[in-house]
Image (tube, helix red, strand yellow):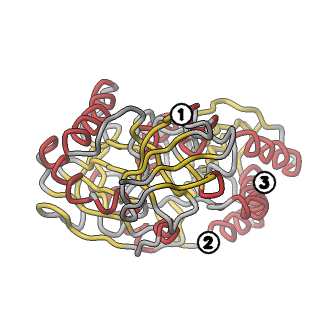
Amino acid sequence: MGYSIFLKKNEEKRILAGHSWVYANEVAKIEGKDKNGSLAAVYSSDGRYIGKGYINHASKILVRIFIRGNGVDDKEFYLEKIKEANEYRLKLGYSNCYRVVFAEADGLPALIVDKYGDYLVIQCLSLGIDLRKKLICECLADLFHPKGIYERSDVAVRKKEGLAEVKGLLYGEAPDYCEICENGIKMLVDIKNGQKTGYFLDQKENRLAARRYAKGEVLDCFCNSGGFSLNAALTADKVIACDISELALKNVRDNAELNGFENIETLCGDVFETLRVFKRDKRQFDTVILDPPAFCKTADEVRDAYRGYKDINVTAMKIVKSGGFLITCSCSHYMTANLFEKMLQEAARESGRMVRCAEIKSQAPDHPAALGAEETSYLKFYVLNVV
């Protein structure tokens, strides 16, 4: 007999609204017995069936529901779910590089699948998904016939599931760098050692939108491998790509050379300090881009993150030429849209500049946000006109 999970009174409301996580402290009782990572049925306090998901006693998220009916988690199920997720992306016009599966938003909690040309990269973020890694790879091979599938489960969140960080080849072959085409620009993606799964696909539409505002001299901060820098180079006279990682800057230079761009230069340094130096030297830019990594990965870090975001945004506003633009982002869902906008309002006041909003965007539509799961809505992209 498998596990049967019975929730405390009213704890089913959030789950019935579309959220998939069942926290251990929401459970009244557990009946039955099975292996950790097995499929468990979840019921409301009065015995109504809600759904099924993988159980993990080592995690605060006891169960992640992904079957709402009477289905089973066999190969046919995974084939259908992944095919359905991919068809949504194809309908939107994606072909070369995109997120194929976005975990909860595609009804497959804790599973990430990204496509980079002929290669797929996956992340397995829960015990249940990790145990079914081989099955999932078989489905991906059947559906996509990729040259290779590489795993990038080298993320700290796996520790909460009692799992080690791992990465490595799961199928076929995988080069150190694979070439993709995004917004008409060629990019080399480091799928083995690049951040996340190798590249930040969620900003693709925002990088395209940035071209409208990238004129004159552009400063791209936290540039990583140069996604914003290369898009800006198409419309700007000059782009300075700044990052603390020399490896990232080498990737920028390689990508610039790949596209024949000669108006990008790289600057290695801590962005906080670099911005202060530019302010001290009265150096100004037509456009400044801020796309930092997540400053807060837990709710407890929000206060410090808020100060960090405000610090860089105040300084950036001060070094934008009158009439120029500040493109500023946050990729932490704990820094909510309302909180991020409040921070920008305070930064504008402290900078002494008149600032108005030209455009607001979120993550690309291959990263859809499930309305019942706020964690899936995380990216904020603001274009501010500094007058």
Few, some or many C-alpha atoms within 10 Å of disc 1 (few <14, some 14-19, many ≥20)? few
Quadrant into which the C terminus falls: top right
Looking at marks 3 and 2 on the same chain, the residue that comes earlier in the sequence is marked by 2
Is 30 in front, or is 140? 30
Q: Quadrant of residue 122?
A: bottom left
Check the picture and name the quadrant holding the N terminus: bottom left
Q: Where is residue 106 shown, x and y percent of the image? A: 40, 38
Q: Position of residue 358 (x, y in %)?
A: 67, 30
The quadrant in which residue 17 appears is: top right
Left or right of 25 in this view: 182: left
Q: In this rendering, would 92 be left or right of 302?
A: left
Decide if residue 250 is in sight here.
yes
Alpha carbon of mark 1 to alpha carbon of mark 2: how far?
54 Å
Circle nearer the N terminus (1, 3) = 1
Q: Is residue 211 visible?
A: no
- Give the residue displayed 48% in from the left and 67% down from the top: 161
Q: Residues within 10 Å of mark 2 (few under 14, many from 20)?
A: some
Q: Which residue is mark 2?
A: 270
Q: Amino acid under label 3? A: Val
Counting from the top left corner in percent of width and height, residue 188 is at: 29, 57
Which comes sooner in the sequence, label 1 or label 2?
1
Residue that label 3 marks: 314
Residue count near mark 3 (Cα–Cα under 10 Å), binned few <14, some 14–19, many ≥20: many
Between marks 1 and 2 in the image, the one whose residue lies nearer the viewer = 1
Query: On the rendered structure, is 385 left or right of 263?
Result: right
Q: In this image, 54 relative to 13: left or right?
A: left
Question: In front: 347, or 152?
Answer: 152
The residue beneath circle 1 is 48
Label 3 to label 2: alpha-carbon separation: 16 Å
For mark 3, give the secondary structure. Answer: helix
In terms of secondary structure, where does tag 2 sit?
loop
